[in-house]
Image (tube, rainbow, N blue to C red):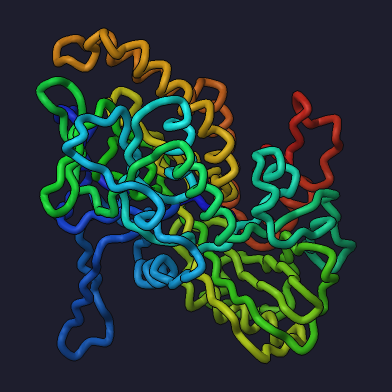
Amino acid sequence: MECLGTPNFAAMVVSTSAPWRSRRWRMRPENVCFSHREYCHLPSVRLRASAGSESCVAVNEGFADEEDYIKGGGSELFFVQMQQNKEMDEQSKLADKLPQISVEDGELDLVVIGCGPAGLALAAESAKLGLSVGLVGPDLPFTNNYGVWEDEFKDLGLGRCIEHVWRDTIVYLDDGDPILIGRAYGRVSRHLLHEELLRRCVESGVSYLSSKVERIVEASSGHSLVVCERDIVIPCRLATVASGAASGKLLQYEVGGPRVSVQTAYGVEVEVENNPYDPSLMVFMDYRDHINQKVQSLEGQYPTFLYAMPMSPTRVFFEETCLASKDAMPFDLLKKKLMSRLETMGIRIIRTYEEEWSYIPVGGSLPNTEQKNLAFGAAASMVHPATGYSVVRSLSEAPKYASVIANILKWNHSEDIFTPGSSTGNISMQERTWNTLWPQERKRQRSFFLFGLALILELDIEGIRTFFHTFFRLPNWLDVAGISRIDTVFS
């Protein structure tokens, strides 16, 4: 579900070749793709099998390095691509609603690369402030299901995009009493969210090009050239990458940071004969062991929980989720575990409406803040390291980030700060923009969340239950500055 976050694509990138660009290994730069959403849209993959062998080796094209490949889907790349390539006919095509970017019209103020929620929101907010904004990326729909706290989405002016609301959320950790969180939860309509963000882009005057981006280079003026497929080059004063976590070919990331881990989840929306859950409650976590799995098995090595959205007494979205693992828990194991759980609970499926494969990289390094190109959303490492949530943060911070970009571009319109050699202005611009996303307090907070991620990675199922028993029962007086621990971790 929501835990959108996800990968960082690409690095044949930006400006000068700086020492921090070195990586462990490189892959070929062809066929770089960018996602319609915060998750990356992955490059093509060829499968090569050895003679007499049943195993297949994925030959990946377009990733910057090994970490980028993991962020893009890694061993689960096939399923990630299946999820991203779903047909969503009810969602409008961007090219049908937005005017095409015209190179003849001259230089744009800002190019936003990536057409997911983060990219669309930032493009709309920036254009609303008077910037000429171009949006570039494949014309793909939103395919993942999003779950949000109802009050948060209403505060963003997006309440009408929620298609179903549960009055409360419930957590089952063991056979003891469940925990009620005391907060309404909503399921976002992918169609309505896509149409609303697109409407904002239309009204603010955003232009669009449906194309993959191959690289960003620096022009002699110090401005940027966004190089797309078919030899299309878009000149702009500034480029911002919002194409998902696997953006290593367009961005530089700090070297020596924490290792990327992965959250995977397999979900089905189904019609069932019987549903044991209260339809008025959203099941946030069910860590109970319905299988009584005492025997060691591969799927038993990954602690998982059930996430359930009862849309009616008989129509339910069930999702088996591995909160985080050092190596992605395979989708086939998640599916096996979900089906075993449902069978043991006596839940009989009579119709399947949709399957979902959710892949969210968590943790990893922050972008290098000395680079000229900017980032937003998952590409800027805005995914919560311990839970995978990111969409609400991206949507809520888009106006402020756009305002900083607009002020800098307008203030420096006649200052020539992008001219090679005038590095002082560039550094000031970089510091102001990156500090908007990652001030020192945010970095400290992220370090604490990374500690939480490291702890989760080491815990077995009993340790996980003990951890969440403690977490959900902490007294309210421990909440800081009016922000609850639930907001801090799961928002």
301 to the left or right of 44:
right
Q: Residue 145: where, in percent of width, then height?
A: 58, 62
Q: Residue 199: where, in percent of width, then height?
A: 51, 47
Q: Can residue 382 be seen in this snapshot?
A: yes
Q: Residue 150: where, in percent of width, then height?
A: 74, 49
Relative depth, front residue between 372 and 471: 372
Outermost residue on the right side: it is 177
Q: Quadrant of residue 111?
A: top left
Q: Quadrant of residue 81?
A: bottom left
Quarter placement of the C terminus: top right
Q: Residue at x 23, y 54 (%)?
A: 32
Q: Can residue 255 be seen in this snapshot?
A: no
Relative depth, front residue between 359 and 222: 222
Q: Residue at x 59, y 43 (%)?
A: 392
Relative depth, front residue between 33 and 258: 33
Relative depth, front residue between 107 and 21: 107
Q: Is 224 located above or below residue 33 in the figure?
A: above
Q: Residue at x 67, y 79 (%)?
A: 293
Q: Quadrant of residue 299?
A: bottom right
Quarter placement of the N terminus: bottom right
229 to the left or right of 387:
left
